[in-house]
Image (cartoon, helix red, strand yellow):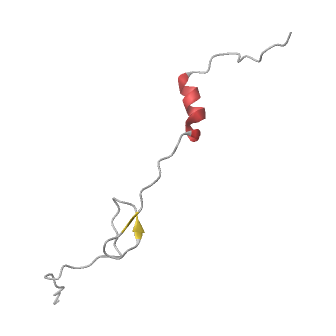
Amino acid sequence: MEHMVVPMKKVSFHKRGVSNGPKALKPIPVIIRCKACGRVKLPHFFCSVGIKQNPGEENNSTG
């Protein structure tokens, strides 16, 4: 007769979640291209490299 290995105590939901947390599936980040410069960026991030002024807007800074 063979004996089965049995855990000594029940593992709580919290302890089980903590130990299995790193095994969870991670969402794949969506990567888009900046419309102004064409560089790769994340959707809600501001691309400071590709700032283009509007055609009617000119930089007239006379000090």
Q: Residue furthest bottom?
A: 62
Q: Which residue is drawn at 58% across and 27% down?
A: 15
Vertical order, 34 against 59 (above or below): above
Vertical order, 2 against 35 (above or below): above
Q: Where is residue 9 in the image (x, y as percent from the top left)?
A: 66, 16
Quarter of the image for residue 29 reads bottom left
Vertical order, 47 against 17 (above or below): below
Q: Residue at x 35, y 60 (%)?
A: 43
Q: Which residue lies furthest to the right in this view?
A: 1
Quarter of the image for residue 22 reads top right
Q: Position of residue 4 (x, y in %)?
A: 78, 15
Q: Residue furthest front?
A: 1
In the picture, the quarter occupied by the N terminus is top right
Q: Residue at x 60, y 33 (%)?
A: 19
In the picture, the quarter occupied by the C terminus is bottom left
On screen, residue 8 versus residue 60, left or right, reads: right
Quarter of the image for residue 12 reads top right
Q: How many labels does the image show?
A: 0
Q: Residue at x 63, y 17 (%)?
A: 10
Q: Position of residue 35 (x, y in %)?
A: 31, 71
Q: Which residue lies furthest to the top in this view?
A: 1
Q: Where is residue 60 in the image (x, y as percent from the top left)?
A: 16, 87
On screen, residue 54 versus residue 3, left or right, reads: left
